[in-house]
Amino acid sequence: MQHRFNGTLRDLRVIGSTDLELEEDLLLRWNITSLTTLDLSQNNIMKIWQQAFYSLADLKELYLSGNSITTLCSQTFYHNTRLVRLSLAQNSITDIQQSTFQTNIKLTDLDMSGNKIVSIHQHTFCNNVNLVWLDLGRNSINYIHPSTFANASKLTDLNLSGNKIISIQPDTFSVNLEMQWLNLNDNNITDIHPSSFQTNRKLTGLHISGNKLDTMKTRHI
């Protein structure tokens, strides 16, 4: 694709360009630097170069769902400090480096569902203090470190369904006082400690079907 756009362009949606590759200077060559919303869903993108989004300092919404992305560089979103919503759903990502979202302090909505992620580093979300909605469903995550969501005190909706989680430590959600909806459906959880949700006073939706629970003590939920 060879295009040059108006330098004041704020919203851009590119769908169906099956040969699109996010090279490091692509958006600069298109004269795109003022975007606040960029939708590149369903373009069969396989690779994102490290500096592909460096020129988009004002970017607030980025949609990369339905592509064929397998890896993300730790610096991919480094300069997108105003990013609020990010979708990486339905790709083939196997790993998220712990520093991938380190500068995205304003991030509120993050969708990484439908990938092939096996594990989440305990510090992956340590700087995402404004995170409200997080979808990690339909991956292959087998373990959640108790401090994974420790800094996400504003988190209200968390989807962990369709993974391979075996157990949940009692203090995993202890600081998520705003949690309202938690989906743990279709994992391999065998036991839930009675104190696991004792601090989650605002929790109104808890989904735990499709696991391997024999019994469950509910007096502290």
Image (tube, rainbow, N blue to C red):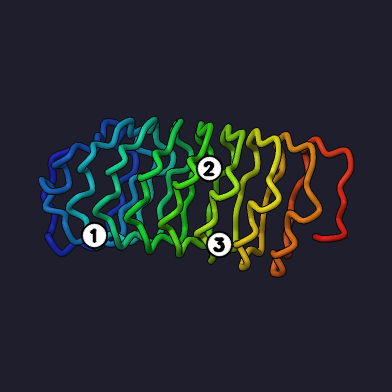
Labels 1 and 2: the sequence-earlier one: 1
Label 1 Cα crowd, 10 Å radius (few <14 / some 14-19 / many 20+): many
Query: Which quarter of the image is occupied by the N terminus?
Result: top left
Q: Is residue 6 above or below residue 26?
A: below
- Residue type, label 1: Leu
- Residue type, label 2: Ser
Viewer-nearest of labels 1 and 3? 3
Left or right, residue 24 beside residue 147: left
Viewer-nearest of labels 1 and 2? 2
- Residue at mark 1 to residue at mark 2: CA–CA distance: 25 Å
* Helix, strand or loop at mark 1: loop
Left or right, residue 45 beside residue 65: left
- Residue type, label 3: Leu
Q: Residue at x 52, y 62 (%)?
A: 132
Q: Which residue is mark 3?
A: 155
The answer to which quarter of the image holds residue 130 is bottom left
Q: Which residue is mark 2?
A: 113
Q: Which residue is mark 1?
A: 35
**Whole-percent x, y for residue 47 in the image:** 30, 32
Label 3 Cα crowd, 10 Å radius (few <14 / some 14-19 / many 20+): many
**Whole-percent x, y for residue 93 in the image:** 44, 33
**Whole-percent x, y for residue 124 in the image:** 44, 47
* Helix, strand or loop at mark 3: loop
Query: Which quarter of the image is occupied by the C terminus?
Result: bottom right
